[in-house]
Image: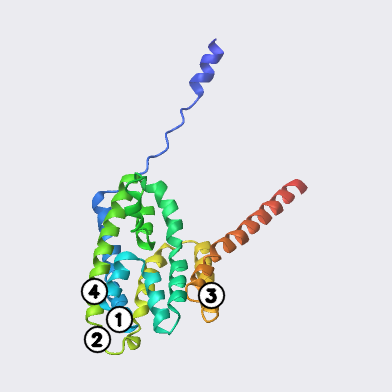
């Protein structure tokens, strides 16, 4: 009995895992507003580009209200401006926007909204709201970040779309301004600080190469979808390297 008592007395209690610190609401709102305002203002570029492609004010505003995914909207009006078939342009924009469905699968588990709320929230599932939501440490902060980003971005994007389409005539030749590159530039500016590891940088670089090589050869929207293969390709190579390193280490240990 005394031996058992001594054994128990020498056991050290396992320290509890440190809890994830809660993020203040003010910090979540600040980050969400920063992203919403920065990207929302680029709706002006879409309004100007759409009007330059020949779409009416009503058509331009309807795209922002109902579609609300900048890359797909720019792809659609860009294809139309280049003289492409409307059905082909719409198909390319649709496939480009299909990535939001995969975002939705991830955010559904993170946000945990009721079935009645999910159809409304789905309209705000885009690159920027996904990035802000997934950066939060808990569900409450995730919901706050998603709501503030989505509301700010939706309101500003539609307002600036209207202003841009309305004032497009005052800018003259819209192609000379290169405004169709504004939205991708903003997205890259948001993405660049998140590429912290070598694997992430290599995947991003390979994606850029895939887009640049296939852009002149494939229909609108397809090169962007094809670039998604960069991530699994890099992960496969990394996995093989890690297994090879483990095998060499194990072989060396066996010989010793």
| First reached walking from the N terminus: tag 3 or tag 2 | 2
| First reached walking from the N terminus: tag 3 or tag 4 | 4
| Closer to the camera in the image, 171 or 8 | 171
Query: Circle 4 is placed at which residue position?
Result: 162
Circle 2/circle 1 CB separation < 8 Å = yes
Query: Circle 1 is placed at which residue position?
Result: 51
Drawn side of residue 32 relative to residue 108, left or right: left
| First reached walking from the N terminus: tag 4 or tag 1 | 1
Q: In terms of secondary structure, where does tag 2 sit? A: helix
Horizontal and vertical percent position of residue 149: 29, 59
| Circle 2 residues within 10 Å: few <14, some 14–19, many ≥20 | few
Q: Which quadrant holds residue 174?
A: bottom left
Query: Circle 3 is placed at which residue position?
Result: 209
Query: Circle 2 is placed at which residue position?
Result: 169
Note whether residue 135 is visible: no
Residue drawn 26% across the image and 77% down it: 57
Residue drawn 54% across the image and 69% down it: 226
Distance between the Cα atoms at labels 4 and 1? Answer: 10 Å
Label disc, if present, on residue 74 of the rendered structure? none
Horizontal and vertical percent position of residue 217: 55, 80
């Amino acid at each position: 009995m005394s031996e058992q008592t001594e054994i128990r007395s020498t056991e050290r209690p396992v320290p509890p895992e440190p809890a994830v610190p809660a993020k203040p609401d003010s910090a979540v709102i600040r980050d969400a507003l920063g992203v919403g305002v920065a990207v929302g203002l680029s709706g002006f570029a879409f309004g100007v580009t759409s009007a330059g492609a020949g779409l009416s004010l009503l058509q331009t505003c309807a795209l922002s209200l109902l579609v609300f995914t900048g890359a797909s909207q720019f792809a659609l009006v860009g294809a139309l401006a280049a003289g492409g078939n409307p059905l082909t342009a719409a198909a390319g924009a649709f496939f480009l926007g299909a990535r939001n469905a995969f975002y939705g699968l991830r955010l559904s588990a993170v946000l945990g909204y009721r079935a009645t709320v999910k159809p409304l929230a789905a309209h705000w599932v885009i690159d920027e709201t996904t990035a802000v939501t997934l950066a939060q440490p808990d569900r409450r902060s995730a919901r706050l970040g998603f709501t503030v980003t989505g509301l700010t971005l939706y309101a500003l994007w539609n307002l600036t779309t209207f202003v841009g389409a309305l004032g497009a005539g005052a800018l003259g030749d819209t192609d000379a301004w290169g405004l169709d590159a504004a939205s991708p530039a903003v997205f890259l500016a948001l993405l660049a600080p998140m590429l912290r590891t070598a694997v992430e940088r290599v995947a991003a670089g390979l994606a850029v190469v895939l887009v640049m090589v296939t852009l002149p050869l494939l229909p609108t929207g397809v090169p962007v979808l094809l670039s998604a293969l960069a991530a699994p390709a890099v992960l496969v190579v990394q996995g093989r390297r890690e297994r090879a390193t483990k095998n060499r280490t194990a072989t060396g240990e066996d010989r010793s």
